Image: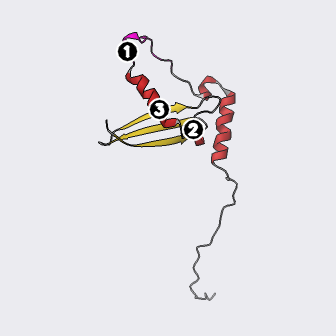
Amino acid sequence: MHVVGTQVIPEQGGKRGFTVEFVGQGGEVVSVQLRNDSDRTLTSHNAIERAKTLMGELASFDETRATDKPAEPMLSARMSGDVEEMEEQLDQGLEDSFPASDPVSVTSSAIPTGKVRKH
């Protein structure tokens, strides 16, 4: 694959991590999702290098040494009962939708015709 471009897409403003997309000359796209650690050391500036490192590790992956046990599926915060994570997601959603309390703008669409009705 001949890479002609890259994109770094932040998740929740980069707080949760980034998705790095490598775009090929023929239109192919390889995406790497990177989760931020607790120290938040992942940034939009070093995400491409981290994704390249991860892709290198993947290229040298030896499937004969891998376990046959399938990976455990990740449960959502609601399914796992993680109240703290649900609160964090709610706070993030509220921040992303701010200011939701702006008043609604009301305008009248009535067009005066100049005619006077006689009763």
Label 3 element class: helix
Q: Which residues are magenta?
A: 61-72
**64 within the magenta span:** yes
Q: Which residue is mark 2?
A: 43
Q: Main secondary structure of the magenta part?
A: loop
Q: Earlier in the sequence, mark 2 or mark 1?
A: 2
Q: Position of residue 13 (x, y in %)?
A: 59, 43
Q: Image check: 47 left or right of 107?
A: left
| Residue closest to the eye, 105 or 116 | 105
Q: Splitting the image into 4 quarters, where does residue 3 fall?
A: top left
Residue holding disc 3: 51
Magenta-colored stretch includes residue 108:
no
Rendered residue at 66%/26% (across/down): 82
Front-most of 23 and 76? 23
Up/down of 93 relative to 109, above or below: above
| Mark number, residue 63 | 1
- CB under 8 Å between callouts 3 and 2? no
User: Is the C terminus in the top left, top right, bottom left or bottom right quadrant?
Assistant: bottom right
